Image (spheres, rainbow, N blue to C red):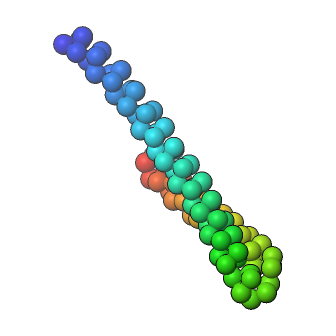
Amino acid sequence: MYGQEMRMDPKKQTQQPQKSWIKALTFGSTIATSIAGLVAGGYFLGAYLDPRWGTSPWLKIILMLAGLVLGGVYLVSVLMGLIKDKEGDE
C-alpha cells in the first residue's frame, strides 16, 4: 500500500505544472495572435482605403495604431480575467 501511494504522488505532482504550462502557453499564443491580427487588419484595411480616399499613408498608420490599442485592451482584459481566476482558486 505504501508503494502505491508513492507511485501516485509523483504523477499528481507532474500533472499540475504541466497543466499550468499549457495554460500559460495558450494564453500567450492567444494574446500574441490577437495583437498581430488586429495590427495586420489595420494595415490591410488602411492599404485598401488609402488609395480610394487619397489619404495615403495616414489611414494605414491610424488603423494600425488603433489595432495596437485594441490589442492592448484585449491583453488587459485577458490578464484581469486570469488574475480573478487565480484569486478565486486560492
Q: Nearer the viewer, residue 65 or 9?
A: 65
Residue 71 in the image: state x and y as whole percent: 63, 64
Residue 73 in view of the camera: no
Residue located at (65% from left, 71% from top): 44
- In terms of depth relative to the viewer, which is nearer, 72 or 51? 51
Instruction: Looking at this view, name the residue that lies furthest to the top.
Output: 3
Quadrant of residue 51 in the image? bottom right
Q: Residue at x 74, y 70 (%)?
A: 65
Q: Where is residue 41 in the image (x, y as percent from the top left)?
A: 62, 69
| 18 w.r.t. 89: above or below | above
Decide: is 26 above or below 47.
above
Query: Which image quadrant is residue 77 in?
Result: bottom right
Q: Residue 49 location in percent, x, y? A: 69, 82
Looking at the image, residue 59 lies above or below residue 65: below
Q: Quadrant of residue 9?
A: top left
> So how many labels did they put on this image?
0
Residue positioned 70% across, 75% down in the render: 47
Q: Is 60 positioned to the left or the right of 83 in the image?
A: right
Q: Is residue 54 visible from the viewing direction of this image?
A: yes
Residues 90 and 69: in front is 69
Q: Residue at x 46, y 54 (%)?
A: 85
